[in-house]
Image (spheres, rainbow, N blue to C red):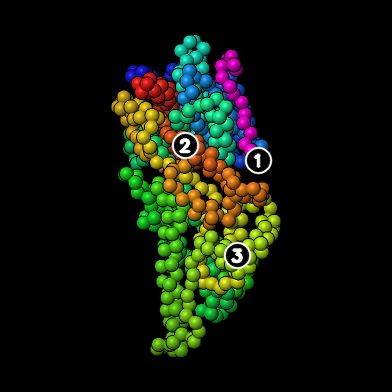
Amino acid sequence: MEGMCEGMSTVGDARDEWFETVRRLTLRLVGIRSVSPGPGEIAVAREVVRLLQEDGLEGAFEAGLDPVAGDPYGRVNAYAYLKGATQRAVVLLGHIDTVNTADYGPLEEWALDPEALAARLDALAASAPEIAPDLAERPGDWLFGRGVVDMKSGVAANIAVLRHLARRAREGAPLPLSVILLATPDEENESAGVLQAVRFLAALRERDGLEYVGAINTDYTTPRSPGDPHRYIYTGTIGKLLPSFLVVGKESHVGDPFDGLDANLLAAELIRDLSMNAELCDVVRGQATPPPVTLHAADLKVGYDVQLPFAASFYLNVLTFTTGPGALLERLRVRAEATMPRLLGHVDAMERAWLAARAGGGASPLPDRPARAGIVLNYAELHARAVARLGEDAVRDALDAEWARWPASLDKRERSLRLTHRLWTLNGERGPAVVIYYSPPYYPHIAAAPCALHEAVAALAAAHPELDLSLEEYFPFLSDMSYLRLEPGVDVAALTANMPVWHDQDTADAPAHLGAYGLPLDDIRALDLPVVNLGVYGKGAHQRGERVLMSYSFGTLPRLIVETLERLAALRVTEA
């Protein structure tokens, strides 16, 4: 076991059976367009099953397609289940969907054909100059195309590993561990595939009495800085919250702007305070999340007129290592409560300056009217005010009517805004005000925890100094790993109470509204899988320069996965 990764660090050394197999499988998967959401995701799932079973391996393991429950596109997960000599089981996870290919411009025709792109590298380098240094440093070692690194090569590596283990079992040398391969759609969208996988794994555990020891995800890894030599293994993953803001000003004619309040001005001041603010980053054990950024901002006017825009909205992408929904909500409230008087004081100062200019100079008092003041509420508080004013039945009926106004296909972020705005109007209150709520999606963060899987990958890294393997805690990109475990103590109640489109999949008796959002939180808690991302290596995901380093990803990585599984099996023997 100690020497099985030797001699794998160069292209020439890596052109062995592993390399050629994973390369061939990658080309087959990349050649199927599977932009999410869409029918191509079904086609590539079927191809995964076909590739798993080819060359007479049909009866070596269970394999098939598991429908994603309630999916409007009819998508499926591909799975394979290779039984081991014990009940202990490891999951190999990867997603089969991609983002679109329009970014390739005139080269889009060949975006799914890496060999055709290889014949056009000059044109690709001209449109993506960042790839030139890599081509010069490691000529012939990069494969280009949509999905080659994010992450069909990772799925290909998993297929190759499971087939290798199945052949070993047939030859009388089975791995003691059971291995379940899952290839899921929709990772680039709302992770419907992995949420179905959670249910699938729960049912399989109940059926066969499995003891899950963890999941190995093979999503892409990439350098953390220019010249970074490391290949990273991650023992947890970053999370995400999408706090959203309904900003209410006060209506007025543009000829008398100080009689009202431009909601865009208040929203802009909030965005200025929150967006790209490093004070809102999580910093944990040497890693820091990227700062929050706005993903959308707009006022609620639908046409031209000369009335001030008196309602606006935005939502903020917040990545997390440790911050939960309740803590973030309170932190944002504090900042909004500090921003509101600062902005209103600025407006008062501007009005005094305008009045002085209109009067020909000198100090001018503000008009005799109530001082400007504002309120900050979260969605749960706004809902409670509406119920106190109108009664629970009236509020429920009004929100049900708002649900019915919009088609099921309405973007969930937009639906969340519409429901929040309707709740605001029910209260009959006046601005200025800020209502903070959550929109989908929610990605739980996962921290490293002592477990056999993490012990195995730590030993793996220590055994191969020649590969520059480096263990880090938090996988820095959003991934399906988030839904395999829920950290103890995460304040999910603050999320569900403040997400207008939330539907509780675990306890709700009423059917979900079309367009609702929910997570199988009880199943995720019960699954409680330790996670590792031991993935392919490349650069340029979601860009026309997307590329995977073949020597490592096709030759080295599958060996590392097999060695990790063997170390896990050996750990159990030692414990016994």
Query: Which residue type carries mark 3?
Result: Val
Q: Which residue is mark 1?
A: 70
Disc 1 marks which amino acid? Answer: Gly
Q: Is residue 55 left or right of residue 471?
A: right
Residue bounds of the magenta highlight: 54-70
Between the C-alphas of marks 3 and 2, the distance is: 37 Å
Density class for disc 3 (Cα within 10 Å; few <14, some 14-19, many ≥20) is some
Q: Nearer the viewer, residue 356 or 392?
A: 392
Quickly name the residue at label 2: 528
Is-magenta flag for residue 68?
yes
- SS label for mark 2: loop
The residues tagged by marks 3 and 1 sit, at their Cα atoms, a distance apart of: 32 Å
- Mark 2 or mark 1, whichever is nearer to me: 2
Within-10-Å neighbours for mark 2: few <14, some 14–19, many 20+: some
Q: Which residue is mark 3?
A: 387
Q: Residue at x 40, y 46 (%)?
A: 321
Q: Quadrant of the C terminus?
A: top left
Image height of 273 relative to 474, above or below: below
Element type at mark 3: helix
- Residue 569 x/y as whole percent: 41, 21
Q: Is residue 66 left or right of residue 529?
A: right
Q: Quadrant of the N terminus?
A: top left
First in sequence: mark 3 or mark 2?
A: 3
